[in-house]
Image: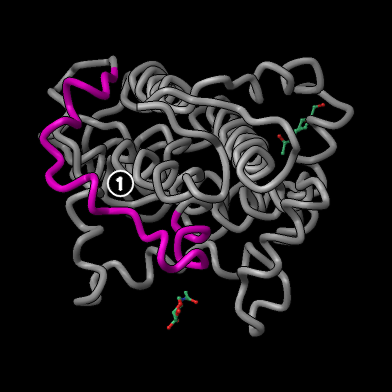
Amino acid sequence: MVVSWRLSSFGVVLSVALALVPGTHGWSKEGHILTCRIAQGLLEPEAAAAVENLLPDYANGDLSSLCVWPDQIRHWYKYRWTSPLHFIDTPDDSCSYQYSRYCHDQHGVKDMCVADNMTEALLFLSHFMGDIHQPMHVGFTSDEGGNTIALRWFRHKSNLHHVWDREIILTALAHYYETNLDNLQEDLVGNFTDGIWYDDVASWEQCDDLLPCLNMYATESINIACKWGYKGVNSGQTLAEEYFDSRMPIVMKRIAQGGVRLAMILNKIFGGSEEVFVTI
Ligand SMILES: *[C@@H]1O[C@H](CO)[C@@H](O)[C@H](O)[C@H]1NC(C)=O
Ligand SMILES: *[C@H]1O[C@H](CO)[C@@H](O)[C@H](O)[C@H]1NC(C)=O
């Protein structure tokens, strides 16, 4: 099936994104806010206008203010259909990710387009583009993506999944950014506009074909989960400075990548004059 990256295929883009995102939780609200702010800052005028038009008035034109919405409504009756999308059984110790292998039995994927409500489609897409970059989202079955690996984060109780969702971000905010999200955002943006990631951004944005791209993002995540998330971590352990110092740069890079790639996709959907075709 050949579809174009245009407004009319927003639902297709969305359903693919939904079908690919495993895990029971995503980034914390801070992670989503950062991803969406970064993305919105990179939109070309046409895409920026389209996004603004889709946002309800109370969002005041700020996409990031509604990027956690899909987490808030996923238990509501009307949105129960989104629930199965939050689980993918990845075999334990499988450090690779294959769409066809693990996702084909997601029932009713075709019916999961919500293109009749473009606002909601935008919010789901924005949310799940963040989540797919959270490494522990592609986790092992028996430990629920690290959720059952109870441990301590510095002095308090936590679990491995939560460490990646939120603890690392909060600790970074406290240590380096005066707990101010704006400061962290500025540093993130600075690092890809003019800093350590400057040379990598073009490769992050590289995407001719949507499905392989989303597969690649998920594969990056499981690779990181194996190499940096699970490795050397046992239940009951205390994770502190050493884990934080070595993992924080990875978390930050994933947030930046999610934002840059969300912008790339929204720019393709809403902007530009040339047709870009993808095969799904
Ligand atoms: C930005 O890059 C500097 C190194 O130049 C690094 O110390 C800092 O942690 C990076 N910030 C983020 C948010 O990744
Ligand atoms: C989507 O649109 C419908 C009406 O078209 C509206 O009732 C609903 O609140 C909208 N959802 C969001 C998140 O704005």
Q: Position of residue 195 (x, y in %)?
A: 85, 26
Residue 255: image quadrant is top right
How packed mark 1 is, by other alpha carbons closer than 10 Å (few <14, some 14-19, many 20 or more), is many
Answer with left or right where residue 269 lies relative to residue 192: left
Up the image or down, 207 lies above or below 49; here it is above
- Number of marks in the image? 1
Furthest residue in direction right, as rendered:
194
Magenta stretch containing residue 122, yes or no? yes
Residue occupying image coordinates x 66% and y 48% = 270
Depth order, front residue of 151/78: 78
The span picked out in magenta is 97-124
Q: Amino acid at mark 1?
A: Asn
Residue occupying image coordinates x 23% and y 71% = 75
Answer with left or right where residue 97 lies relative to residue 31: left
Magenta stretch containing residue 17, yes or no? no
Residue occupying image coordinates x 45% and y 33% = 3
Res 252 visible: no
Residue occupying image coordinates x 65% and y 38% = 268
Q: Position of residue 149 (x, y in %)?
A: 22, 40
Depth order, front residue of 57/114: 114
Q: Quadrant of the N terminus?
A: top left
Up the image or down, 65 lies above or below 16; here it is below
- Secondary structure category for the residue under label 1: strand
Mark 1 = which residue? 159
Q: Position of residue 221 (x, y in %)?
A: 41, 26
Depth order, front residue of 250/154: 250
